[in-house]
Image (tube, helix red, strand yellow):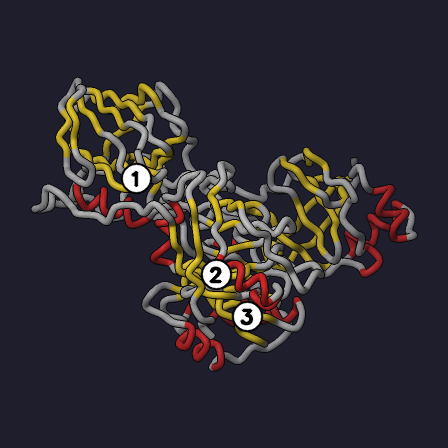
Amino acid sequence: MIEVLRAGPLTTLQDLGRPGLAHLGVGRSGAVDRPSLRLANRLVGNAEGAPALETTFGGLVLSFTEAATVAVAGAPAPLCVDGRAHASCTPVTVRAGQVLELGMPARGVRTYLALRGGVACELVLGSAATDLLSRLGPAPLRDGDTVALGRPAGPMPGVDHAAVAPLPDEVVLRAVPGPRADWFTADSLTRLGRAAYEVTAASDRIGLRLEGPALTRQRTHELPSEGMVEGAVQVPPDGRPVIFLADHPVTGGYPVVAVVHPDDVALAAQARPGQPLRFALHRPLL
Amino acid sequence: MRTLAAGHRGLLVECDDLPEVMALHRTLQEARARDALPGVVDLVPAARTVLITFDDTASHGRVAEALAALDVRPGDDDRTDHEVEVSVTYDGDDLDEVARLSGLSVDEVVRRHSAATYRVAFTGFAPGFAYIVGGDDALVVPRRATPRTRVPRGSVALAGEFTGIYPREGPGGWQLIGRTEAPLWDLDREPPALLAPGTRVRFTRLDP
């Protein structure tokens, strides 16, 4: 068993979420940076979607009462076991009685800690994910909580380190216009493709909120609520775009000017408040 | 119907009206049940659209092709849709306001609301929250000018052409006409939502 000595700013249990239930008002949720969750799990021989811990700006301290193999991926945070530093993206053995500390990452936001065997917990609608918008799944970890290890599902991989690209200084997200690009002035679309935005501190698992040039609508009537996708760049009345992440609402009533490329959503998930962000706007898909 | 790309993994289908949305969603669900929509992840009906999301084994072209092959017939299928009866105590805080807006007496509001037959058009806002249509035209009322910060769980409320029931306490701007004990969201039930798109609904009056 593992005791949570310090949970940090926000640590939740995440897997690949609950796809396929949006018609019931249940969003996908799950890891905001899915490739990092998958990588951390692969490094300890878990199924890619096994439940793991998603930390926000690190700050996690765990005490192990039994031995475990762990790996961290995502935002590169200093990892120490009983004071000894270990690398990210590397399986690390923790002995019974040892304390693991995950510090504040120098870049990025979310670090994933996978435990060999995964985390044993009750699934809600087939998933261990904590959905902070819908309030589904386990509550975020608190100091003093315990975490139970699951059973290993397969052999350990034959690798001791995975190379990953470093997180960039400036976040550039590929995006395609639509489905409501025509609700905005032509100027606004040009602006979206050229402007320097900045990630604000109001960003969370629901969405990345941006500061920067406001986008202006040419259609001002109310949009009937419609289905929203992950990566949607929704524009509320103040004109400042919001990029929808894992816990985004299933439907929304503000027009979506563009959608971020699925492979770049993980980059958005790691964008820090204050970081510059641009859109590389590609041609419409249809 | 018009289709729009919602990013690399989504197709947003615009419909003429809500009945067309409901017919399309039903047809898509049936198609998915017989594996005619490979790679499709979610079908999300809303007020004027159905969003189809898919994984990387599908594409806009393939989904649009499958969509074009479907025979979308308007109208409901009363043989297959199940019906839910929702018992309501009509004592909501906005009942007088709804009566004033509709030009009816409170009694007549209640009589008409519980006389109509309804159907769930779509869900959203919160797990288990359904947008229910089919009510009396006289009961089409706007949202409250100022939303409430706290609406009790089980509140039955009106906004526009819809009736909705709050599955849990939270903020809300709909006009409250009553309350129900109906278990709208139960994770131990399959599916957990009492009201899913297509479900027929009857509201029956409980004496306060």
The residue at the point 24 percent across, 30 percent down is: A78
Q: Amino acid at mark 2?
A: Gly
Q: Does B202 sit left or right of A110 as displayed?
A: right
- State how far apart marks 3 and 1 are (Cα): 37 Å
Q: Which mark is residue A120?
A: none
Residue B145 appears at what percent x and percent y?
A: 79, 44
Give the mark, 2 or 1, whose residue is nearer the N terminus: 1
Q: Are marks 3 and 1 on the same chain?
A: no
> In which quarter of the view is residue B54 placed?
bottom left
Tell me if mark 2 has few (under 14), some (14-19) or many (20+) residues whose alpha carbon lies within 10 angstroms of its own: some
Q: Is residue A187 above or below residue A278?
A: below
Q: Are marks 2 and 3 on the same chain?
A: no
The residue at the point 80 percent across, 59 percent down is: B136
The residue at the point 60 percent across, 37 percent down is: B168
Residue A152 appears at what percent x and percent y?
A: 17, 39
Q: Could you tell me which secondary element the residue under label 2 belongs to?
A: helix
Q: Are marks 2 and 1 on the same chain?
A: yes
In terms of depth relative to the viewer, which is nearer, B172 or A39? A39
Q: Which mark is residue A75?
A: 1
The residue that mark 3 highlights is: B13
